[in-house]
Amino acid sequence: MSEELIFQISLELVPGVGSKGTKQLISYCGSAAEVFKSPKNKLIKIPGVGDKLASTIKASNPFREAEAILISAEKIGAEVLHYTNPLFPHRLKQVVDAPNIIYKKGSGDLNPKRTIAIVGTRKATEYGKSITSKIVSDLLALDVSIVSGLAYGIDIQSHKTCLRENIPTFAVLAGGLDRIYPSIHKRYAVDMQKAGGIISESIPGTKPDPHLFPARNRIIAGMTDATLVVEAAAKGGALITAHLADSYGRVVFAVPGDVGHTFSEGTNKLIATQKALIYTGVEDLIYHLNWDLNSETSDSKPELQALSDDELVVYNLLKATGEAIEIDLIALKTQIPINQLASHLLSLEFKNIVRSTPGKKFGLV
């Protein structure tokens, strides 16, 4: 049992810290264990902490509860992944409201080369199910992982097609990993763990209450390159996922439908309001996501293959940003402690991958 992991879970249990506060504390202290071990006068100096929160942290003793959570995860065979773990989804880590900890069951890679979310109404039409199956089948040759929510309708159709075509697929759950919902889809949740998996931010035993579903949608949107909405009414979870993906700067696609049809209203409105690109075939994904299928990507260059996990995270952030940014902002977005980040940036400078500019800013060469 990892001592640091217990401290990481414990920090989540301290009242008033919150997701951003946790990242700020770990960034300055270097680890969750050091947050609890640091004297109050050091914690107070961290931006955004203050006397009240520092006092709460020093008075907190959530370690037994954290150990119990870790034991419950181990009992159901779930991995507990903190955002500092290199196995944590890199794409999700870049999202401002991402969870600090996720629970995962399955052998699939959460950091695949390409990944998209496929979502839609629970009351899918036969056309919706058919086009979903075609979309998934068309992706077979592109080495793409597919993420959805295990719900009725479009979600489960995408999962089932992935299983049939041997495409890695992940389901993000609203409750604990031991509370599969809907229960009728449990066998699919089990089958997908062979090449993909099931994921949740909820601790084991958590019931899939209604308020947890919108929250889980941000994980679906955040851990993928793009979100594809197949069918959706004017309101619903699929549109929440689409709007979240758009707010994260991710590409959103929507399948157009018949004018006047209930489950075309949402997708057609996304296209009409320019919140989504129209999806007419897999070529749209290849073009708009810049998936170069005929040549090596820049990430396969020998000098990049030699980078450490943290160095690659920094490289990907600077590549996505497209300009030099402050070291403090790099630390906040990557959640690499500043003292370690400075060392990584220096190493990247020596490798002629990163350059420093005035104002403690760093960008790609």
Image: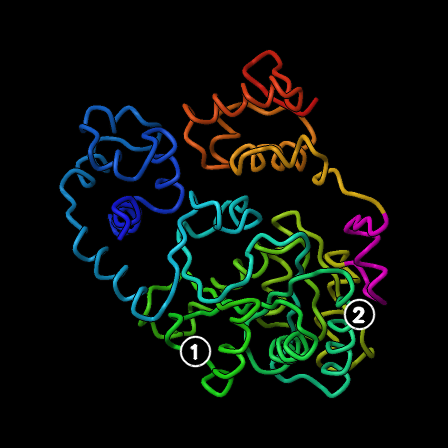
Give the quadrant of residue 31. Answer: top left
Residue lying farthest to the top in this orientation: 358
Which residue position holds label 2?
A: 138
Q: Is there CB contact under 8 Å for labels 1 and 2? A: no
Determine the residue positioned at 36% across, 68% down: 77
Where's residue 340, x and y in %? 43, 26
Q: Which mark is residue 180?
A: 1
Q: Is residue 230 above or below residue 62?
A: below
Where's residue 207, x and y in %? 35, 75
Stretch in magenta: 277-294
Closer to us: 284 or 300: 300
* Left or right position of 20 against 166: left
State which mark lies toward you, 1 or 2.
Answer: 2
Q: What amino acid type is highlighted by mark number 1?
A: Ile
* Left or right position of 355 against 290: left
Where's residue 48, x and y in %? 34, 32
